Amino acid sequence: MDADRPDATSVAACLPPGRGAFIAVVGPSGAGKDSILDKVRATRDVSDVRFVRRLITRPAGAGGEDHQPVSAEAFDAAQASGALVLWWRAHDLAYGIPAETRTWVEDGLIVVANLSRSVLADALDRFPRLIAVNVTCDASVLAGRLAARGRESAEDVSRRLKRDVPLGIGEERVYRIENSADLDVAADRFAALIEAVRATQ
């Protein structure tokens, strides 16, 4: 349950003065991060919110999120040229956040991006007005979702479930959403954070 966790207003209060904000969505694969973001986009006023389309070395038709597919060579070139503000590698894939994201935040937009927990500290260095949304769910629910995707072996699923990555930033900047059951409740909680961040600008 989220009732005993910090509310949106108290988490948003940690942001330094300024305009724009970077909301980094993290959590284990299968926790439902994309489902929450899709629900918020479809049902809320997000005219001042920019959802980042990540560069991933995965084919466009491979399932999962809407991403910008790139070859490994193109990804390396983008990283070397400064076209990415954040990047990481996981599960034999490379992921990147476009450098233009900085401009969006500087222009006063609330920017939402799905990140790896391993780069949160780097993200905070680049975006001082950052909040992390940590999406979690019950282990049995997570295992079922991963198995239903059919993209990984049982061994790979087991390895994902055991993976524990520290967030690397202060807890005061972490907003937690439990997403085992009711997607509407999880989306409401995310939308409440957007409203609280708006109020700080």
Image: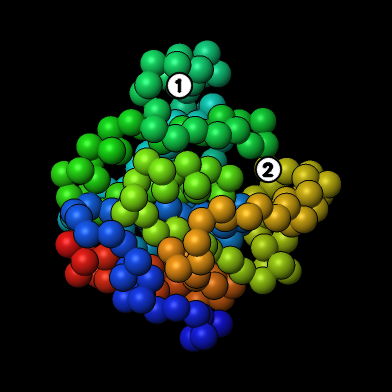
- Residue 180 on image: x %, y %: 59, 72
The residue at which mark 1 appears reads as 79
Secondary element at tag 1: helix
- Residue 129 on image: x %, y %: 31, 54
First in sequence: mark 2 vs mark 1? 1
Which residue in the rendered view is the most extreme toward the bottom?
A: 3
Using the image as rendered, state which of residue 48 and residue 59 is in the foreground. Answer: 48
Asked whether, in this view, residue 140 is left or right of residue 46, the answer is right
Asked whether, in this view, residue 147 is left or right of residue 65, the answer is right
- Can residue 7 be seen here? The reply is yes
The residue at which mark 2 appears reads as 151
Task: Please report the residue visible at 52 percent of the width from the left and 13 percent of the height from the top.
Answer: 73
Using the image as rendered, state which of residue 149 and residue 134 is in the foreground. Answer: 134
- Residue 109 on image: x %, y %: 21, 50
Callout 1, which amino acid? Gln
Quarter of the N terminus within the rendering: bottom right
Callout 2, which amino acid? Arg
Task: Please report the residue visible at 57 percent of the width from the left and 55 percent of the height from the top.
Answer: 167
The quadrant in which residue 52 appears is: top left
How far apart, in angstroms, are the residues tagged by discs 2 and 1? Answer: 27 Å
- Residue 43 on image: x %, y %: 28, 66
Quarter of the C terminus within the rendering: bottom left
Task: Please report the residue visible at 83 percent of the width from the left and 47 percent of the height from the top.
Answer: 155
Number of numbered labels in the structure image: 2
